[in-house]
Image (spheres, grey):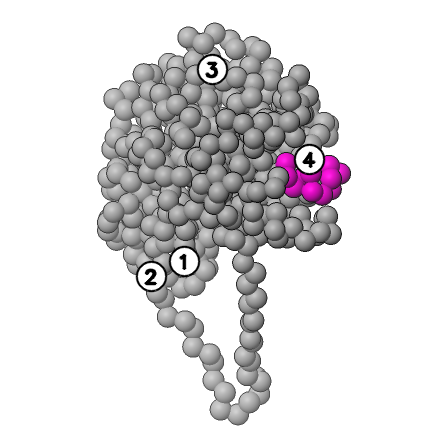
């Protein structure tokens, strides 16, 4: 995310003991299966403990959504998941909207609502793989973040745009709303034919019938719920292709509100910035690309997977930032929101890399200006980027600017060769996964052969300006 709104590594050793009984042992009987229990109504996130569920792992979301010009929707989401233990009930995150029916494995299920939880009780306990189909309708709400900004389903003058970071996905479909549970998606949106619908992944079908058009987007790369997007409105749609540095051909779909013109120069930046990033971070990890430029009125851009959304015309630096997120934040996603510097510090540092090759200061010069100059305000140094407890600080300068500065300190310590090896291996080894700061530190130490505890303690885990840099 590029925004105007403004754990220390813990090594846990787990001992696993296996107990088995010989099959021929006299008197030995079958081991009793664990009785079904309700799924835990939290994924355990340090900043948002009320969201997510620990009882299952989602494999796929299939969403059908009908959008009316009145702003109301009628929708069905089918969740394909695997229970991590036998479940007598399980919860999905859903804010607002009226649920009309729940079906689990083909059988009608009962359900209740409390807070932003939809608790589903199937006719039979679920074990292993299961599907839950939830039908719902109403006028989606816009979620207000702890810092006062707006996210989730945001109505616009000609439709609506979804910006789901960090928890706004629950305003438009029921889900396991945690970045540690990534899944594939298929999203079908039916809207009046005069409107266009942007989404994640590839546009695989578009069918017009009786004044309405259904747009079908498939996302085959595992995606966190906060990166799921639809943008419905009056757009000019631009289709093209690009060749990556590795020889892949990528389709590009861009959606631009007519009042902004064609934005041809901005659209040309998309393939340029992807190739720029590939030369530093490794192969582009997604299956398509593009941008959405709309008058959303939220005051920030968001790295929605494959196709970032910009609230108004972006500058080159913001496009670079959101494209870099396709590697760091989208493909490689933090398990816990406290580790958001793994998203924003990396994307912010990519802006410095771009500036250095386009007539601006070197990353070290930019670092020195921030460390010594007027940019070095108290807000930059407190709280620590990877040890804060207030979700209102999620999009503040420590995660963005100080996070990027941490990477420059690391580069200076280990040298450019090892530094870019670390970045490329991080993107390659953790592709499609949810990760922790501790894992990044371990990789940096393994590649460099250095003990980097003090560097990361100073820059990520200690509030206040690090001394001696």
Instruction: Check if mark 2's residue and mark 1's residue have beta carbons within 8 Å.
Output: yes
- Residue on which the image places disc 3: 313
What predominant SS class does the magenta segment belong to? helix
> Whole-Å distance between the Cαs marked 1 and 4?
35 Å
Q: Residue at x 31, y 24 (%)?
A: 155
* Residue at disc 4, secondary structure: loop
86, above or below 259, in the image: below
> Whole-Å distance between the Cαs marked 2 and 1?
8 Å
* Residue at disc 2, secondary structure: strand
Residue 61 x/y as whole percent: 44, 42
Residue 45 belongs to the span the image colors magenta: no
Quarter of image, res 248: top right
Outermost residue, bottom direction? 26
> Whole-Å distance between the Cαs marked 4 and 3?
28 Å
* Residue at disc 3, secondary structure: loop
Outermost residue, right direction? 417
Classify residue 356 as left or right of residue 176.
right
Instruction: Check if mark 4's residue and mark 3's residue have beta carbons within 8 Å.
Output: no
- Which residue range is magenta in the image? 408-418
């Amino acid at each position: 995310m590029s925004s105007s709104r403004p754990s220390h590594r813990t090594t846990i050793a787990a001992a696993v003991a296996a107990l088995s009984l010989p099959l021929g042992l006299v008197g030995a009987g079958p081991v009793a299966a664990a009785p079904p229990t309700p799924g835990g109504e939290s994924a355990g996130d340090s900043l948002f403990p009320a969201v997510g569920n620990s009882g299952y792992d989602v494999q796929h979301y299939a969403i059908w959504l009908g959008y009316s010009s009145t702003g109301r929707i009628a929708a069905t989401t089918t969740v394909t998941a695997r229970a991590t233990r036998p479940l007598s009930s399980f919860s999905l995150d859903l804010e607002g909207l009226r649920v009309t029916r729940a079906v689990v494995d083909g059988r009608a299920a009962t359900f209740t609502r409390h807070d932003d939880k939809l608790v589903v009780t199937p006719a039979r306990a679920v074990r292993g793989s299961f599907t839950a189909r939830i039908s719902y309708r109403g006028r989606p709400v816009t979620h207000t973040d702890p810092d006062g900004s707006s996210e989730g389903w945001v109505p616009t003058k000609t439709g609506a745009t979804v910006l789901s970071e960090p928890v706004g996905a629950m305003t438009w479909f029921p889900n396991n709303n945690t970045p540690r549970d990534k899944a594939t998606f298929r999203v079908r949106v039916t809207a009046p034919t005069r409107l266009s619908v942007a989404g994640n992944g590839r546009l695989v079908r578009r069918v017009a019938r009786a004044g309405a058009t259904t747009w079908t987007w498939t996302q085959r790369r595992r995606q966190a719920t906060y990166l799921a997007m639809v943008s419905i409105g009056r757009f000019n749609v631009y289709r093209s292709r690009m060749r990556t540095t590795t020889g892949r051909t990528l389709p590009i779909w861009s959606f631009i509100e007519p009042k902004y013109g064609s934005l041809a120069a901005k659209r040309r930046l998309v393939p340029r910035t992807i190739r720029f990033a590939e030369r530093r971070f490794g192969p582009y990890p997604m299956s398509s690309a593009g941008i959405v430029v709309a008058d959303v009125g939220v005051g920030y851009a968001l790295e929605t997977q494959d196709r970032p959304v910009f609230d108004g015309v972006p500058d080159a630096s913001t496009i670079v930032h959101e494209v870099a997120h396709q590697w760091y934040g989208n493909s490689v996603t933090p398990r816990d929101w406290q580790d958001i510097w793994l998203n924003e510090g990396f994307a912010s540092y990519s802006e410095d890399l771009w500036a250095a090759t386009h007539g601006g200061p070197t990353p070290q010069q930019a670092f020195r200006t921030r460390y010594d100059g007027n940019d070095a305000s108290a807000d930059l140094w407190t709280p620590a980027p990877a040890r804060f407890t207030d979700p209102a600080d999620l999009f503040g300068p420590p995660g963005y600017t100080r996070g990027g500065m941490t990477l420059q300190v690391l580069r200076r310590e280990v040298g450019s060769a090892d530094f870019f090896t670390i970045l490329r291996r991080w993107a390659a080894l953790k592709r499609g996964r949810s990760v922790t700061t501790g894992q990044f530190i371990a990789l940096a130490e393994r590649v460099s052969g250095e003990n980097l505890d003090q560097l990361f303690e100073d820059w990520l885990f200690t509030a206040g300006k690090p001394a001696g840099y």
